[in-house]
Image (cartoon, rainbow, N blue to C red):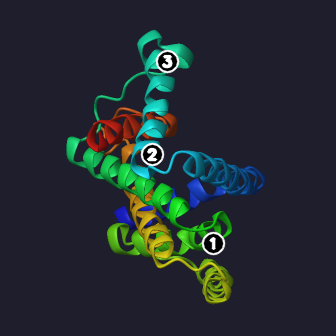
Amino acid sequence: QAQTQTRQDKMAEKKKVSMVMLLFYLVMWYVLNVQYNLYNKKILNAFPFPASASLVQLGAGVFYVLPQWILGLGGRKLPSTIPISLLLTVAICHGAGHFATVISLGAGSVAFANVVKAAEPLFSVLMGIIFAGSFPSTGEGVSLLPIIAGVMIASMAEPEFSQIAFVFAMLSNVLFAARGTFAKKMTNEKETGGVKVSGADAFAVSTFCSFLIMA
């Protein structure tokens, strides 16, 4: 009965998802990610210190969210019920993944980094299987094939192929996929003692902790 109830709950959650909003967020994620990479490359061309650049970027997120937590703007507050081990795991993956992304952009072209980073959904599926026991549907699995083929073809045809850029871009894919898998638990009330933690606050506190760890 418990398994049946769990399946029904999962089906109910899937029904609540708006496909239009999901598509919108997906497109915006790609668009903003590309713009971020372009500006990052410009910064690294003028300031070729990827570790310092990535640390400053994480710090900018801290200065953005701290006033909101302190003043309680928009009902925001510092999450205090997230298990320390879970928070540290997400923060390390978040910070290290960000460092790897910036290093990749500094070592190769933006176009190449964007291509390799496009494989992140594949790693998200793998992390979901390994750490959450969540297997994709047949349709979801098939949809990954064009991504895998595209990354392979583009990498082989890349005239400015950089092994360092490729390795660190793949490393960031792994770390960000792991972050996404564990970050879901941060918004799960079963993991936070029944206290609801928003996705924005979960992301903010992981950025805050990753800045402190990487500093």
> Residue 55 sits in which quadrant?
top left
The label number, if any, that marks residue 112 in the structure image: 1
Q: Is residue 96 left or right of residue 198?
A: left
Residue that mark 2 sits on: 54
Q: Separation of disc 2 and disc 1 at Cα?
A: 19 Å
The label number, if any, that marks residue 206 in the structure image: none
| Nearer to me, 186 or 1 | 186
Residue at the top extreme, as displayed: 71
Q: Quick one: label 2 or label 3, which is nearer the N terminus?
A: 2
Residue 33 point in image, percent of width and height: 64, 53
Q: Quadrant of the N terminus?
A: bottom left
Q: Secondary structure at mark 2?
A: helix
Whether residue 61 is visible: yes
Q: Quick one: label 2 or label 1, which is nearer the N terminus?
A: 2
Report the residue at 61% width, 58% height from top.
14
Q: Is residue 1 left or right of residue 140?
A: left
Q: Amino acid at mark 1?
A: Phe
Q: Secondary structure at mark 3?
A: helix
Q: Is residue 149 left or right of residue 94?
A: right
144 above or below 65? below
57 above or below 75? below
CB of mark 1 within 8 Å of CB of mark 3? no
Residue that mark 3 sits on: 68
CA neighbours of label 3 inside 10 A, class few (<14), some (14 to 19), many (20+): some
Residue 8 point in image, percent of width and height: 51, 61
| Nearer to me, 137 or 199 | 199
Q: Secondary structure at mark 1?
A: helix
Q: Amino acid at mark 3?
A: Gln
| Nearer to me, 186 or 179 | 179
Q: Separation of disc 2 and disc 3 at Cα?
A: 23 Å
Q: Nearer the viewer, mark 2 or mark 3?
A: 2
